[in-house]
Image (cartoon, rainbow, N blue to C red):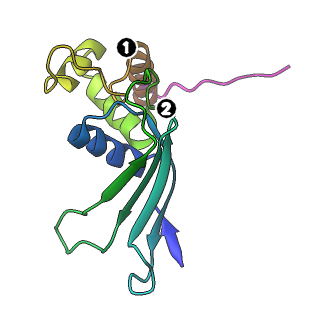
Amino acid sequence: MYTVLKQGVWTNIINDWFIKSCSISCNIIYKRCRVANDVNKAKHFIDFSGKCKDCLAVVVGWAEKRPDEGKPLVVKIMIEGMDMLHEHTSKRPLNGAKRQEVGMQLSHDSASNWRRQAVTSMTFGEKIPSNIYKNTVLWKCKQSEKDKILGITLIFNTV
């Protein structure tokens, strides 16, 4: 028996942490995440998997035990078949809770400032990771958030 984590939330949290701590250029699309209801009967507390959209590397991650109250979750990740020479050009989708969070930040700032702030820890010549979005995506995110604040909804009539 297991439960699943909320779609559009956990993938962004895991991926942002993974890119920040490992400095990889893979654009991982996560497929599933299972959380064991009974840790004593399961092999791992959390299991998830995914695949790089560009080089097709397979990613498997797990947490062996539930963290204590207020402690961080210890996650182990294994990547198999990663091709460092392959050109990684695709970007992660900006969706779910992260889209709302970025939209709220952009409602008070510009897309170029958001990008500039997101890459402050990088050094010149480093490849921009897949979780730093293009200005067009950020502009659309900002527009969607402003439309939501103003109560504007789009209605499509099909003939």
- Mark 1 residue crowding within 10 angstroms, few (<14) / some (14–19) / many (20+): some
User: For mark 1, what is the residue?
Assistant: 135
Whether 155 is drawn above or below 99: the answer is above
Residue 5 falls left or right of residue 107:
right
- Farthest bottom residue in view: 40
**Which disc, if any, is residue 70?**
none
Q: Quadrant of residue 96?
A: top left
Secondary structure mainly formed by the magenta segment: loop
Of residues 142 and 131, the one nearer the viewer is 131
Q: Which residues are magenta?
A: 150-159
**Which disc, if any, is residue 55?**
2
Q: Is residue 73 visible?
A: yes
Of residues 22 and 35, the one nearer the viewer is 22
First in sequence: mark 1 or mark 2? 2
Q: Nearer the viewer, mark 1 or mark 2?
A: 2
Q: Is residue 9 visible?
A: no
Residue type at tag 2: Cys
* Quadrant of the frame with the C terminus: top right
